[in-house]
Amino acid sequence: MRASQLLIPTLREVPADAEVISHQLLVRAGFIRKSAAGVYNLLPLALRVVKKIEAIVREEMDRQGGQELLMPIIQPAELWQESGRWDVYGPELFRLKDRHGRDFCLGPTHEEIITDLVRNEVKSYRQLPLLLYQIQNKYRDERRPRFGLLRGREFIMKDLYSFDRDQAGLDVSYQKMYEAYARVFARCGLRFRSVEADSGAIGGKDTHEFTVFADSGESVIVYCEHCDYASNTERAASPPERIPVDEQPAPLKEVATPGRRTVFEVTSFLGVNEKRLIKTLLFETEKGFAAALVRGDRDVNEIKLQKELNVLRCELADPQTVERVSGARLGFAGPVGLSGVKIAADLEVMEMVNAVAGANKDDTHFLNVNPGRDFKADLVADLRLVKAGDACPKCGRPLAETRGIEVGQIFKLGDKYSKVLGAAYLDENGQARPIIMGCYGIGITRTMAAAVEQNHDANGIIWPFSIAPFHVVVVPVSDRDEKQMEMAQAAYESLLGAGVEVVLDDRPERPGVKFKDADLIGYPLRVTVGNRAVQSGELEVRRRANGETVFVPRDNLAGYVQKIIAAELAQLEEKAQKYSMNAP
RNA sequence: CGGGAUGUGGCGCAGCUUGGUAAGCGCGCUUGCCUUGGGAGCAAGAGGACGGGGGUUCAAAUCCCCCCAUCCCGACCA
């Protein structure tokens, strides 16, 4: 392709509305343009990248026996009503009506549609297992779309659904997808990790997220540097820290703590360690108020809490509510004598002896609070938010923390959807059984953005060879120098002939402009044709990633470039290989 | 949804406090000359009526009200 004819509108300045680097660079380098908040045009370069990622995904899905199909974006409300999610999904579901007033939605996911399809078409155990997938646009009316392609309202996703006879079959399918996912992201040149995750509203038990390490990521994950443990903090388990105590419970005692509101203020005023304080946080749920108790130096994991309380809504109460419910200003709530509130205590709290806690009275705390004796917990569970430095639940060594972008997630659904939607098969004995399902998503457009987050420098994007929109750009230094243009043209044609994806930058621009654009766009290789090349017959091949430059005789160019590309792809394949048959 | 901010040619911004004497700058774009190894130079041009609506005023980009859009923080997140 000739740059003079391609739509690659590069920008010199950073767009004012782009915050994260992938958003800035994709806009500046002419890959995307915004249409509305969270809705983007994918320009020719971006579409090429998307297609590259899709091709890798297809290969890996097919390798595991996946079959591609295509399901509708517009989905009838009836199916969603049948599964119960029409009401549960909330305002995030894009809803619309047709001219007859029938309700539809734009699919945010396709469990309903695929389950409907399968329940109608699959009747026998002989038809199972089945791995069906599609690559399709998805719609979620996010409350707050942000970060460009990282969190859009319209995005491209690959979703695969597995259908098995039983749990053992599901385990096999899950295993296959785990391997496929690791291979996909390795081949895309991403540094990632599979992490244990929370299954959220989709339900199901086992689930892993594939997370690309990046500071701009929205998920916080903890991982162990010594073993293979990694988990989203939303779900990370936290074995209680055992603190040996040789004290005997002492009598409860009230002390004045005037104006000491925070954990730090109270403990330093009383001269005790934060680990001795019981932090009491009030939450409002649809089932009433709940108090979460954790040690003073800990934070509450609201997702764990919500799960343990078995509620849909769980929000930290505001100060007025706290005052009303506890009878004291914010900062003086405690479990002792707290009534009308469900008390959920973290495991660690139950082991405390002679602890400090709020007295539900202004400017007052209790000393020598002993769980069980001074208050009863309605619920004892792991409620705390894991953070860096906490012990790894697998090997006990300190965990590290990092941020990441979730590019894929795999779930074991079980019979959640097949039961409500009535997707069953007849087994060998003629017995009807629910189909056991799994679902597996990869954010294609998000993966593209994540790749930019991980692969860029001050000058622009550095595409991995496997997903670069083009492999090479040929840059004649002067468009007015006939010999250079001729040589560039010949180089371009020889590369084209060799099957290399190449752009000839034939624009009448000064060399600086073309070099800057080449770096910004992120072609992995640049072939420069200047006077030196004309005189020596050797072309300059420069690697975008490290600036390394090699001079290659013109007749060897195509072969040389082919070799580099092959080597780079082989290297990625080698990384992918490591993940094969290497499951959770 | 709560809090904050912004909206002026394609992009980035100034002007708004103290209404009038102004729509201005840089980049980009067009034409010509010149230049050609890291976003050159000179010259001449095209392009906005200031997010939308209403109001105050002799007079509004500037003041007031409503709405919309966009971004940030939070909440939320198959």
Image (cartoon, grey):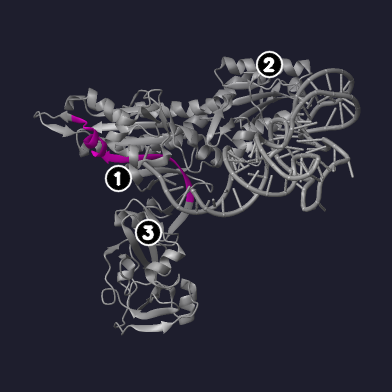
**Residue A296, located in which quarter of the rendered image?**
bottom left
Residue A281 part of the magenta-drawn span: no
Start-end of magenta stretch: A403-424
Q: With respect to residue A149, does A133 lie above or below? A: above
Q: Is residue A427 visible?
A: yes
Q: Is residue A470 visible?
A: no
Disc 1 element? loop
Q: Position of residue A564 (x, y in %)?
A: 56, 28
Name the chain letter of the residue that bears numbered label 2.
Answer: A
Query: Residue A284 got which mark?
Result: 3
Task: Indicate the quadrant containing the C terminus of chain A: top left, top right, bottom left or bottom right.
Answer: top left
Q: Is residue A486 left or right of residue B77?
A: right
Q: Residues within 10 Å of mark 3 (few under 14, many from 20)?
A: some
Q: What amino acid does circle 2 point to?
A: Gln
Same-chain status of marks 2 and 3: yes
Q: With respect to residue A275, does A53 lie above or below? A: above
**Residue A137, located in which quarter of the rendered image?**
top left
Point out the tag, 1 or 2, that comes first from the N-terminus.
Answer: 1
Q: Which residue is mark 1?
A: A206
Question: What separation in Å lies between label 1 and label 2 (alpha carbons)?
Answer: 55 Å
Residue name at image x 66 percent, y 27 percent = A9
Q: Is residue A484 left or right of residue A355?
A: right
Q: What amino acid does circle 3 point to?
A: Glu
Disc 2 element? helix
